[in-house]
Image (cartoon, rainbow, N blue to C red):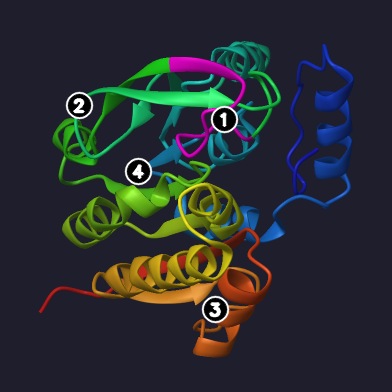
C-alpha cells in the first residue's frame, strides 16, 4: 500500500522488504506522493528519472496515462521490471541514465548495485558505463499536447543536469520534483579540496543549482512548500549537508 493505493511488489532481499514496509507506513517521501497526486493526471506523461525499484512509477501509474521510468542500475532495473510485471501497469521501463549528452555515463555503486545510491559522483564499488539520453531526446518523443510532470532523483548528478532541467521545465511547462544531494557532492569535493574549500564549493554549487531552476519556475522546499532562504541552504548544504527535495512549478509563458 502506497498512500492509499495497493500494489504487489517483489521482495527477494531483506533490504527491499524493509523499504516497502517503511513506505507502506508512510515513512518514505510523503511529499513525493503529494506531488504525484497533484500533477500526474489523465492525459499526462509522468517521467521518473532515477526510478530505482519503482515506488514513484507504480504510484504515478494510477493517475497518468503513461509513465516512463529510467533506471540504469542493473539490479534495481531488474526489481523495477518485476514490480511492473506484477501490477500490469502502463509503465515503460528503460535501462538508461539521463545526461546532458547522449552516449554513456560512468556510474558506481559503493554498496553494490540494487541499492538506492548508484551515482556518477563516486568511483567506489561496482562500476557501469550506462547508456544515456538527454532531456531534449525525451521532449522530442512526447507529443506537444500531452502534459508532462517529472521526478528526478539521480544521486548528485542533478548538479550537472540543472540547466537542462530548467530548460525542460520551461519548454514543456513541466512541474518538477527534484531530490538534491549536497552530502554526496560534499564527499566528492572533499576528495578534491581541503575541508573548508570543499564545503564552500558544495554550498555554492547548491545555490547555483536552485538559482538556475528559479529561472524556469517557482522553487519551494517539498517538505514545507516554502521558498528556500539563505539560512535554509546554509543548514542543508553548508553546515550539515544532507539530502532534501524541491518542487519547481513552471511560470506561465508571457
Query: Label for residue 43?
Result: 4
Q: Is residue 234 left or right of residue 156?
A: right
Query: Label for residue 102?
Result: 2
Q: Is residue 70 left or right of residue 26?
A: left
Sequence-first disc among 4 and 1: 4
Residue 70: % across, % down: 43, 28
Q: Is residue 33 visible?
A: yes
Q: Residue at 36% of width from left, 65% of height from top?
A: 209
Q: Residue at 59% of width from left, 29% of height from top?
A: 52
Q: Residue at 46% of width from left, 50% of height from top?
A: 192
Q: Nearer the viewer, mark 3 or mark 2?
A: 3
Q: For the view shown, which residue lies furthest in the front direction?
A: 194
Q: Is residue 69 left or right of residue 250?
A: right
Inspect the magenta stretch and tell me whether residue 119 lies in it: yes
- In what quadrant of the picture does the C terminus appear? bottom left
Inspect the magenta stretch and tell me whether residue 56 lies in it: no
Q: Main secondary structure of the magenta part?
A: loop
Q: Nearer the viewer, mark 4 or mark 1?
A: 1
Q: Mark 1: which secondary structure?
A: loop
Q: Mark 2: which secondary structure?
A: loop
Amino acid at each position: 500500500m502506497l498512500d492509499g493505493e495497493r500494489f504487489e511488489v517483489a521482495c527477494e532481499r531483506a533490504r527491499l522488504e524493509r523499504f516497502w514496509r517503511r513506505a507502506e507506513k508512510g515513512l518514505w517521501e510523503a511529499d513525493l506522493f503529494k506531488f504525484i497526486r497533484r500533477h500526474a493526471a489523465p492525459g499526462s506523461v509522468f517521467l521518473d528519472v532515477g526510478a530505482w525499484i519503482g515506488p514513484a512509477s507504480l504510484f504515478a501509474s494510477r493517475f497518468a496515462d503513461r509513465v516512463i521510468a529510467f533506471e540504469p542500475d542493473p539490479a534495481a532495473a531488474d526489481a523495477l521490471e518485476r514490480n511492473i510485471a506484477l501490477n500490469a501497469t502502463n509503465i515503460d521501463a528503460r535501462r538508461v541514465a539521463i545526461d546532458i549528452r547522449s552516449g554513456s555515463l560512468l556510474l558506481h555503486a559503493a554498496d553494490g548495485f540494487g541499492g538506492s545510491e548508484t551515482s556518477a559522483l563516486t568511483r567506489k564499488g561496482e562500476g557501469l558505463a550506462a547508456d544515456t539520453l538527454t532531456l531534449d531526446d525525451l521532449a522530442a518523443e512526447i507529443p506537444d499536447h500531452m502534459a508532462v510532470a517529472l521526478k528526478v532523483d539521480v544521486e548528485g548528478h542533478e548538479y550537472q543536469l540543472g540547466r537542462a532541467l530548467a530548460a525542460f521545465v520551461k519548454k514543456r511547462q513541466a512541474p518538477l520534483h527534484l531530490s538534491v544531494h549536497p552530502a554526496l557532492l560534499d564527499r566528492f569535493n572533499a576528495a578534491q579540496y581541503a575541508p573548508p574549500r570543499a564545503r564552500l564549493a558544495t554550498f555554492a554549487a547548491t545555490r547555483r543549482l536552485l538559482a538556475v531552476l528559479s529561472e524556469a519556475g517557482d522553487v519551494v522546499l517539498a517538505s514545507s512548500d516554502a521558498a528556500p532562504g539563505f539560512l535554509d541552504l546554509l543548514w542543508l548544504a553548508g553546515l550539515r549537508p544532507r539530502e532534501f527535495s524541491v518542487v519547481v512549478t513552471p511560470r506561465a509563458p508571457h
